[in-house]
């Protein structure tokens, strides 16, 4: 695999990794950090049911001992700031769209949370890989909540992509450099 950490290597840089469901985006991001010797995995998913709990458990097991896992479904900025202070190792956030879902379900101020994340990203000194689902390729959703989610995700991706040193789109397990 030719992709490496963001341009500044272990001293910083942000890499946004987008793709559809089961596109290979998480595996791609994990491989980047595995090649760097491991890092911190900020998991934003919640186990709302048994099937999701099983997915989370399998995901944890597949990462192995190179990772420290931080489960943080809402306070992503705080988790990133902690990693930034304790520093050194790269950080993988998986994923921004699950984080957005959690914020919406908790009736949080999405614009304020997005702004806080975008303000923080340029200040991070550890390399950060942000994984997210590209949801803008589909049809217009039929209900207001799904449309709001799609719109929030699209705006967040645009903002993060503008700030990121690298942007990669993963399709069918194949990474394509966008930026």
Image (cartoon, rainbow, N blue to C red):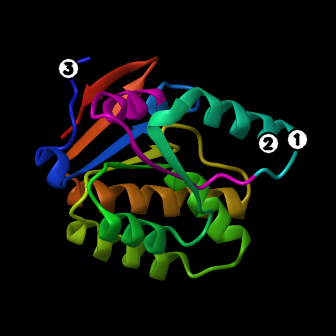
Task: Quickly name the residue at label 1.
Answer: 50
* Quadrant of the drawing holding the C terminus: top left
Q: Earlier in the sequence, mark 3 or mark 1?
A: 3
Please provide percent x and percent y for residue 47: 78, 50
First in sequence: mark 3 vs mark 2: 3
- Find numbered disc 1 in the image and state the secondary structure of the residue it sits on: helix
Q: Residue at x 47, y 68 (%)?
A: 79
- Left or right? Give the position of 82 relative to 107: left
Give coordinates of residue 150: x percent, y percent: 55, 55
* Image position of 75 with respect to 83: above or below: below
Q: Which residues are magenta?
A: 27-46
The answer to whether 88 appears left or right of 107 in the picture is left
Image x and y of residue 115, in percent: 38, 77
The residue nearer to you, when weighing 40 against 44, is 40
Q: In which quadrant is the N terminus drawn?
A: top left
The residue pinned by badge 2 equals 53
Disc 2 and disc 1 in contact, CB within 8 angstroms: yes
Instruction: For the residues labelled 3 and 1, say whether their Cβ atoms are less than 8 Å apart.
Output: no
Tell me if I can see residue 133 in this picture: no
Q: Label 3, label 2: how many angstroms apart (C-alpha)?
A: 33 Å
**Residue 2 bears which disc, if any?**
3
């Amino acid at each position: 695999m030719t992709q490496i950490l963001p341009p500044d290597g272990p001293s910083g840089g942000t890499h946004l990794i987008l793709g559809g469901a089961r596109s290979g985006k998480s595996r791609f991001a994990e491989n980047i950090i595995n090649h760097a010797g491991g890092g911190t995995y900020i998991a934003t998913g919640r186990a709302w049911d048994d099937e999701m709990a099983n997915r989370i458990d399998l995901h944890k097991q597949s990462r192995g001992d190179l990772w420290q896992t931080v489960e943080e479904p809402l306070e992503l900025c705080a988790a990133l700031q902690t990693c930034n202070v304790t520093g050194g190792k790269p950080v993988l956030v998986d994923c921004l769209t699950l984080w957005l879902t959690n914020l919406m379900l908790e009736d949080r101020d999405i614009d304020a949370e997005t702004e806080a994340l975008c303000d923080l990203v340029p200040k991070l000194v550890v390399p950060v890989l942000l994984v997210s689902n590209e949801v803008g390729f589909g049809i217009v959703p039929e209900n207001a909540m799904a449309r709001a989610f799609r719109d929030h995700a699209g705006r967040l991706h645009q903002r993060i992509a503008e700030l990121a040193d690298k942007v990669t789109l993963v399709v069918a397990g194949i990474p394509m450099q966008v930026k």
